[in-house]
Image (cartoon, rainbow, N blue to C red):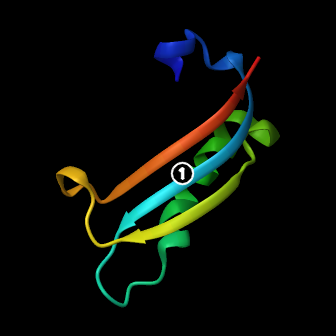
Amino acid sequence: MKQYLGNLDEIKQGVKVLGFVNSADGFVLQPAVINGGSKLLVEVFGEEGRHSRSAISSNELPFNTPVEIELIVEIK
Protein backbone atom coordinates (compact mmCIF):
# COMPACT_ATOMS: atom_id res chain seq x y z
CA MET A 1 0.00 0.00 0.00
CA LYS A 2 2.82 2.37 0.87
CA GLN A 3 4.49 1.77 -2.48
CA TYR A 4 1.24 2.42 -4.35
CA LEU A 5 0.07 5.43 -2.29
CA GLY A 6 3.49 6.86 -1.48
CA ASN A 7 2.49 7.34 2.17
CA LEU A 8 0.39 5.31 4.60
CA ASP A 9 -1.19 8.56 5.81
CA GLU A 10 -3.29 8.40 2.64
CA ILE A 11 -5.30 5.54 4.15
CA LYS A 12 -8.52 6.81 5.65
CA GLN A 13 -10.09 3.60 7.00
CA GLY A 14 -9.71 -0.17 7.00
CA VAL A 15 -12.79 -1.69 5.38
CA LYS A 16 -12.45 -5.47 5.01
CA VAL A 17 -9.93 -8.25 5.56
CA LEU A 18 -10.42 -11.62 3.90
CA GLY A 19 -8.01 -14.28 5.14
CA PHE A 20 -7.46 -17.73 3.69
CA VAL A 21 -5.64 -20.22 5.92
CA ASN A 22 -4.02 -23.35 4.48
CA SER A 23 -5.57 -25.89 6.85
CA ALA A 24 -5.42 -29.61 7.54
CA ASP A 25 -8.64 -31.55 8.04
CA GLY A 26 -10.08 -30.84 11.48
CA PHE A 27 -8.28 -27.51 12.00
CA VAL A 28 -10.91 -24.92 12.97
CA LEU A 29 -8.91 -21.98 14.36
CA GLN A 30 -8.70 -19.93 11.16
CA PRO A 31 -10.05 -16.81 12.92
CA ALA A 32 -7.25 -17.04 15.50
CA VAL A 33 -4.66 -17.21 12.70
CA ILE A 34 -6.07 -14.08 11.03
CA ASN A 35 -6.26 -12.20 14.37
CA GLY A 36 -2.58 -11.24 14.02
CA GLY A 37 -3.23 -9.32 10.81
CA SER A 38 -6.28 -7.60 12.25
CA LYS A 39 -4.39 -6.58 15.38
CA LEU A 40 -1.51 -5.22 13.30
CA LEU A 41 -3.86 -2.96 11.32
CA VAL A 42 -5.26 -1.49 14.54
CA GLU A 43 -1.74 -1.03 15.96
CA VAL A 44 -0.58 0.80 12.83
CA PHE A 45 -3.72 2.84 12.05
CA GLY A 46 -5.50 3.07 15.41
CA GLU A 47 -9.29 3.14 15.28
CA GLU A 48 -9.12 3.81 11.51
CA GLY A 49 -7.61 0.34 11.16
CA ARG A 50 -10.75 -1.41 12.45
CA HIS A 51 -12.48 -3.43 9.75
CA SER A 52 -14.89 -6.27 9.04
CA ARG A 53 -13.27 -9.64 8.56
CA SER A 54 -13.70 -13.16 7.25
CA ALA A 55 -11.40 -16.13 7.86
CA ILE A 56 -11.73 -19.09 5.54
CA SER A 57 -10.17 -22.54 5.51
CA SER A 58 -8.44 -23.74 2.37
CA ASN A 59 -7.00 -27.16 1.72
CA GLU A 60 -4.35 -25.65 -0.56
CA LEU A 61 -3.07 -22.18 -1.46
CA PRO A 62 -0.85 -21.10 -4.37
CA PHE A 63 2.89 -21.75 -3.93
CA ASN A 64 2.11 -23.65 -0.69
CA THR A 65 1.53 -20.32 1.07
CA PRO A 66 0.28 -20.81 4.65
CA VAL A 67 -1.89 -17.67 4.72
CA GLU A 68 -3.27 -15.34 2.07
CA ILE A 69 -4.83 -12.01 3.01
CA GLU A 70 -6.90 -9.64 0.92
CA LEU A 71 -7.26 -6.13 2.35
CA ILE A 72 -9.67 -3.41 1.27
CA VAL A 73 -9.04 0.11 2.55
CA GLU A 74 -10.61 3.48 1.93
CA ILE A 75 -8.13 6.13 0.82
CA LYS A 76 -8.39 9.88 1.26
Q: Is residue 50 above or below residue 3?
A: below
Q: Position of residue 74 (x, y in %)?
A: 72, 29
Q: Amino acid at mark 1?
A: Gly
What secondary structure is marked by label 1?
Answer: helix
Residue at image position (39%, 84%) is 27
Residue 12: quadrant of the picture:
top right
Q: Position of residue 50 (x, y in %)?
A: 75, 47
Q: Is residue 56 above or below residue 1?
A: below
Q: Position of residue 42 (x, y in %)?
A: 69, 45
Decide if residue 22 is on the left or right side of residue 18: left
Decide if residue 53 is on the left or right side of residue 67: right
Residue at image position (42%, 72%) is 57
Residue located farthest toward the right when viewing the structure as drawn: 47
Binning the other alpha carbons within 10 Å of mark 1 as few (below 14), some (14 to 19) or many (20 upward) gives some
Q: Position of residue 43 (x, y in %)?
A: 67, 42
Decide if residue 63 is on the left or right side of residue 16: left
Residue at image position (48%, 79%) is 29
In the picture, which quadrant includes the C terminus?
top right
Residue 10: quadrant of the picture:
top right
Q: Is residue 4 above or below residue 71?
A: above
Q: Is residue 50 above or below residue 19?
A: above
Residue located farthest toward the bottom when viewing the structure as drawn: 26
Residue located farthest toward the left when viewing the structure as drawn: 63
Q: How many marks?
A: 1
Residue designated by label 1 = 37
Residue at image position (52%, 23%) is 1
